[in-house]
Amino acid sequence: MNLYKIIFEGKVAEGYSIEDVKKNLASLYKVGVGKIDRLFTGSPIEIKTDLDYKTAVKDQEAFEKTGAVCSVVSMEEDADHSAAADKEAKRSTDINKPGRPQSLLQPPPLGANRRRYTIIHPLFMSLYSKDFYRDVAQNWKNYAFLYLLFLLALCSVVKTVKIHYDLSDFLTVHAPAFISQFPAVTFSNGKASIEADEPYSIKDPNSGEDIIIIDTTGQIKSLNDTSAVMLLTETKLIIKKSDRQTQVFSLSEIEDFRLDQDVIHGWLRIVQKWLAVILFPFFVLGSFVYRLVQVLIYGIIGMLFASILKTDIEFQSLISITIMAITPVVILDTFMGPAGISPVFWRFLCFLISMGFLFFGIKANSNPPDHSNISLEL
């Protein structure tokens, strides 16, 4: 089993004074400040050795909460390089070294003041990991917004692919029976005409109800008392938007155009090819704005949770935790949606799930792991 050690070089985090850090370390390890002075020599000092990965991570967290900056180093790799480099070169074998292969399921070991987890980890670690939520609060901050954009882009890909296949299914299965009813319509000098008996109706293939009515003779002038949603007269196109609202478009700008089944098929092929591509950026941008507003509202609720748990946490860190807390709901909503569930109840259920993970994330930052058994190996 690979073992690790914690190395301290006398460096302190921004915003801390050396004297304050010394007092914090003395309090943590229950020793006199004089003994702590021996750590601040400027040379690398081994604080703990022969640790497993999990213990090394916990010990470093406790050490760095005092304001001191330390590193976790693999003892096996450090030993492999000892014959070829001095002490400073040995430190470069830290298991956080860029370019070293990492398993997505195994978080990379800690380095000083850097994120332990990649942009992929929140997709599953937001469901269960306290260590992950602690890292988010300490190190993610503005990076969390980039992750949110990445998450929503992934989900938007799923949505656009679904739209593409739904549209393809419609064009293959349902559209032919509908389009085959269209007569050839000629537009000339702002007036429409067809080569068929009028009023002409295009019906729903399933229910048999009128969907579109074409009447250039003036017999039908409105959609009142009809089931149709569209009426084409000689000079107007009338569309029913709701039971109380219709919209009227004048044909006066159309000088010379012929609409037939071949033209409709051509339009639908273009829509089938490009609709998903066109919709993708709108999905991403729209969902990003929506989730940002949601995160800000949930962040305010998170402040209440932090107060209840007596957790001192910055609002920016709280926002980062909130982004991770809504991750399960965003994924759930993308792949399931309100399938067979009332939309109102679904939104309420998503809210409850988000609140549960938000509370979990804040609670993970309320009490650091118990490190009272740690002793300095000086």
Image (cartoon, helix red, strand yellow):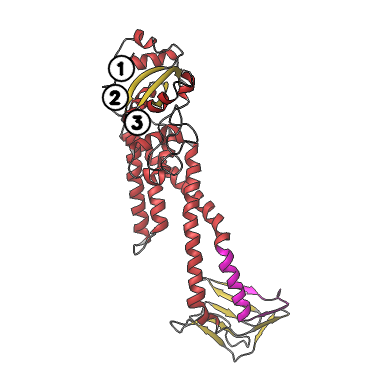
Residue bounds of the magenta highlight: 248-275
First along the sequence among labels 3 and 1: 3
Image coordinates of residue 30 in percent, x first then y, are 29, 15
Instruction: Identify which amino acid the numbered label 2 is placed on.
Output: His
Q: Is residue 46 above or below residue 367?
A: above
Q: Would you name the residue on which mark 3 appears?
A: 2
Disc number lying in front (3 or 2): 3
Q: Is residue 132 above or below residue 41?
A: below
**Numbered circle sitting on residue 334:** none
Q: Would you name the residue on which mark 2 appears?
A: 371
SS for dot 2: loop
Distance from the alpha carbon under mark 3 to that under mark 1:
26 Å
Disc number lying in front (3 or 1): 3
Please report the residue visible at 47 percent of the width from the left and 21 percent of the height from the top.
15
Q: Nearer the viewer, residue 108 or 357?
A: 108
Image coordinates of residue 317 in percent, x first then y, are 43, 35
Instruction: Identify which amino acid the numbered label 1 is placed on.
Output: Tyr
**Numbered circle sitting on residue 29:** 1
Image coordinates of residue 4 in percent, x first then y, are 36, 27
